[in-house]
Image (tube, helix red, strand yellow):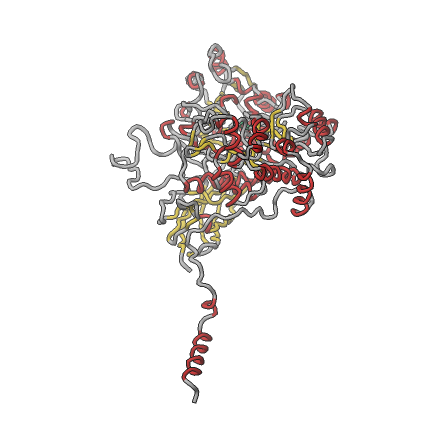
Amino acid sequence: MRSPLRRLAGALLAALLMLPLGSYAAPAADPYAPRPEGAIVAGGRIHDRSGLDAAEIERRIDALMARMTLDDKIGQMVADGWDTDFDDRRVSEGHIGLLSGVETPAETARLQTLARRSRLGIPLIFARDALHGYRTLAPVPLGLAASFDPEIIAAAGRFTGREATGQGMHLTFSPMVDLTRDPRWGRVVEGPGEDPHLARLFARAMVDGLAEGGLQATLKHFVGYGAVRAGRDYAEAEISVSTLHDLHLPPFRAGLEAGAQVVMASFSVLNGVPVTADRRLLTKLLRDAWGFDGVVISDWDAVRELMPHGVAGTPAEAVEKAVTAGVDVDLASGLYAKELPGLVASGRVPVARVDEAVRRILRVKFRFGLFDETVTPIVDPKVAAGAAATPEIRAAALETSRRSIILLKNDRDLLPLVRPPKRIAVIGAAARDAADLMGSWGAKGEEKDVPLFFDELRALVARFGAEVRFAPGCDDACVKTGGFGRAVRTAEQADLIVAVLGEPWYLTAESTSRTRLGLPNRQQALLDRLAATGKPIVLVVLAGRPMVMGEAWPKARAILYAFSPGTMGGRALVDVITGAVNPSGRLPMSLPRAVGQLPFSYDMLPTGRPPKPDDDLSARYVDEEVTPFLPFGHGLSYTRFAYSDLVLSTPTARPGDTVGVSVTVRNVGARAGREIVQLYVHDVVAARSRPLRQLKGLARVDLAPGEAKRVRIDLPVDDLAYADDDGRWALDPGRVDVFVGGSSTATTSASFELVRP
Ligand code: BGC
């Protein structure tokens, strides 16, 4: 007989052996439990040109820092703009680490030679705001976003990079990835628009493209600048933690994942604190939680501006706040150089913080390849002269311009002008204005590189024996109206009017907030006069933001929205007007009906009282529709596309899964065309209200007339996660509706269920 103890041990062993293997592991974590965001994985794509391994870079930094005095270290933390009075001793004595806006390759080469011959030989970083090109300009960033095509955005980054590095630049203060839902803010032109998915694609594509062209990116403005109150530039923003993580931070993460090494702190105020002084954002989040090991640079003069912001009483206090918040480099205020020595001597700023900043700056300089002449040589001015505005770069720019143009309206197929009418009147000063094509932040763009719209159209239609006549009507902002009469007479004598109106470049970008968003000044009056002639009108809108188009709409039979389409924009517009190119651009921001709807975005949350026309207690305006004038993602083509057979790869999914979404797209018109296939989701029931529509996938498909293709877009379930009040990612089981089509109002739909394992 076995003893009772042995029997018990035997029974226990048997019971254990019968348990499924999984039971021996720790209980599986709930896949639906909110999880922290975690560190960034740059996926081996850190833009490191040094050829050195990470440990070797740190060793070289140690060796260099061992030879640096406090003054040398502070010198690396100083950045400034170049001007003709620039004092060379700042470079030869090591008092500056980064210079922005040096005008010529010869000057760049001279200054870099001085830096290399300085005691420590630490090279300078040469930077510039090259947001959509250096000399050859792509469409402004919002126009690039309108391509809805990461390939086009990356191409613009590539040629920007090639041209800028060819002139001796290392770094651009771009891309701006601030999410923006309020077109009153002039800086909407600099960014990717209203949608976080498109903004992430934009950030990634731009950082990658720039790096492929050899140029390093700065992600700006970290974070929240795009949400300034009422669109007023330099005003404050209020953003909840969940909204910050859901909307505003993802484009920055995407850019960092692509390998960006520099982040510019926003000079705006977020939730009461100027970001330049916000340690939670610049250090706790960016460095500690996300693991960013690159450089944070201030925005222009932002360290000094902590005083007028009212969070620092003295320059020393401003510096103390900025540097301890995590700003490594002071751009343009000059206060780090003045105040840091004293602050370190008094112990108010620990020398360890200075060392940390300097290590980051040197690390980035090593990664840029600046210490290795064979990787990043000093620019040769003779070579530089032939490296800009080359035929290849101009061809690449032309393609980006063509893909950014949006056809908003085309009544009775007025466009394309396959056989142009005999007499065309081109009205509007912008039709002959190079600067309005190039757009704001024109970097080193040159007017002589720009084929003007009027000239291009005239040359093209001349081949058909047609004649084009021009009358500006007024100046490009349309303040002076003396030319109205002649413009109307020119229009009366024509068979067709092409009116080129909208925002001149100087009404867009920094410090150009607007309270009225119709055509500026007297342009609408000019358009009304042209329409009164009864001649058909093609309206070409050049603009830096979505405008309120209701008044202009009925006056034109066709409307092309071209933003500022860049150096080659005039030719691209003619290609589209004549049908050589079938337009495929899409609205990267909803067009509002009225300024009173702003801020506006298509991804609204549901409401307990959805808008109903005959219900006076529903979410509505009593004097206007709640819907946009035109929805996000909208854009016409000279052909039409039909969607059918939407199939999901699975009826159920779990966190970590990917749902394959397949649909047939058919060209049911008579011309070849490109469709931008858009995938939207709605998570029907969750712990937080989820938007009625959210863009989660894009595909581009080229189709001949009558042709159909099966298009598949992968939807990673984790992309449905949303941020909770602590900035953790959450996801809930339940139904998810999927919509596929050509805009955010797509109707072809299917559903799947998020289930528990
Ligand atoms: C802008 C930045 C820009 C900087 C340098 C500032 O006024 O806010 O976006 O990079 O100037 O030109």
> Does residue 325 lie above or below 531 as drawn?
below
**Front position in the image: 514 or 246:** 246
**Front position in the image: 44 or 541:** 44
Provide residue 623's location: percent of width, then percent of height.
Answer: 30, 28
Q: Where, quadrant-wise, is the C terminus in this rendering?
A: bottom left
Q: Is residue 337 visible?
A: yes
Q: Where, quadrant-wise, is the N terminus in this rendering?
A: bottom left
Answer with the quarter of the image where residue 79 lies.
Answer: top right
Q: Residue at x 54, y 20 (%)?
A: 431
Q: Is residue 543 visible?
A: no
Q: Is residue 487 left or right of residue 605?
A: right
Provide residue 695's location: percent of width, then percent of height.
Answer: 45, 42
Answer with the quarter of the image where residue 330 lies.
Answer: top right
Q: Residue furthest bottom?
A: 1
**Front position in the image: 699 or 643:** 699
Q: Is residue 241 left or right of residue 354?
A: left
> How many callouts does the rendering have?
0
Q: Is residue 297 left or right of residue 376?
A: left
Q: Residue at x 62, y 27 (%)?
A: 100
Provide residue 217's location: percent of width, then percent of height.
Answer: 59, 36
Provide residue 701's location: percent of width, then percent of height.
Answer: 53, 43
Report the image quarter containing ligand 1: top right
**Front position in the image: 287 or 616:** 287
